[in-house]
Amino acid sequence: MCSVCSVVTNPSALSPAERLRRQIAFITEVDKLKEVFRQTILTQSRRAENSAEHSWHFALMIIVLAEHSNHQPLDVLRILKMVLIHDLVEIDAGDTFAYDTKNMADQHAREAVAATRIFGLLPPDQTSEFRALWDEFEEQRTPEARFAMACDRFHPMLLNCLTDGHAWQKHGVTHDRVLARNAHVANGSQAIWEYAVRMIDDAVAKGHLLPKP
């Protein structure tokens, strides 16, 4: 096959200049994640947290807490990649509040469409890698994905406990709903889940989380 035909038929055969153009287009696009705001608030200024801040804090948690995973050893670098790309879909799909049952019904479908568009900005090999990592998190079949989920669910619980149950209070969330929503934490880390349960019980005792009706 001639070299020209190879370029046409092989989607990964991009020139270095075209690869760089696509990569910078992606980097530019994902800056929009800083404009997606969540229901959780920051512990100091008490302003709404944005999804990029969540991703940073979430990634740091992976590094610090990896020893508490149910499974050892973990591929921490793969988890960090997973974590840093997982919420990019919120640029198109928005942040879906954990206790918004109506919008959660089609959350995965909306986010999958967003993943196709956003990761599709990259060169084909990176598009495939990023989509595979996003799917791995969603499918929860690997120890790395389960630990990533554990930390992802723990993070907003921690922020709520540190801000007097702000989002829980705002939306009338009750103790039983928090436990039901976040029980999957135990699949990735039993130790973190046990800590979370004590933390949630303490929030109820302080009046920051409504007890089960």
Image (cartoon, rainbow, N blue to C red):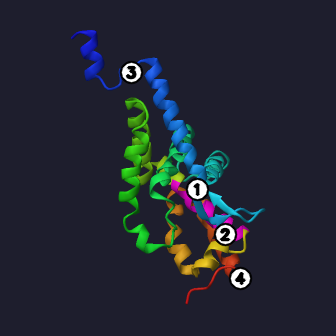
Q: Secondary structure at mark 2?
A: helix
Secondary structure of the residue carrying numbered label 3: loop
Three-letter amino acid code of the residue under disc 3: Leu
| Residue drawn at x 49%, y 37% as measured from the top left | 26
x then y, percent, for residue 169:
64, 79
| Quadrant holding the N terminus | top left
Mark 2 belongs to which amino acid?
Answer: Asn
Task: Name the residue beneath numbered marker 3.
Answer: 14
Q: Looking at numbered disc 4 in the image, what kind of residue is underneath it?
A: Ala
State how far apart marks 4 and 3 are (Cα).
59 Å
Between discs 3 and 2, the one toward the N terminus: 3
Q: Is 43 located above or below residue 19 in the figure?
A: below
Badge 2: how crowded within 10 Å, few (<14), some, or many (20+)? many
Question: How many neighbours does mark 3 have within 10 angstroms: few (below 14), some (14-19), or many (20 or more)?
Answer: some
Q: Indicate which disc, 4 or 3, sits on the residue closer to the N terminus.
A: 3
Q: Which residue is mark 4?
A: 205
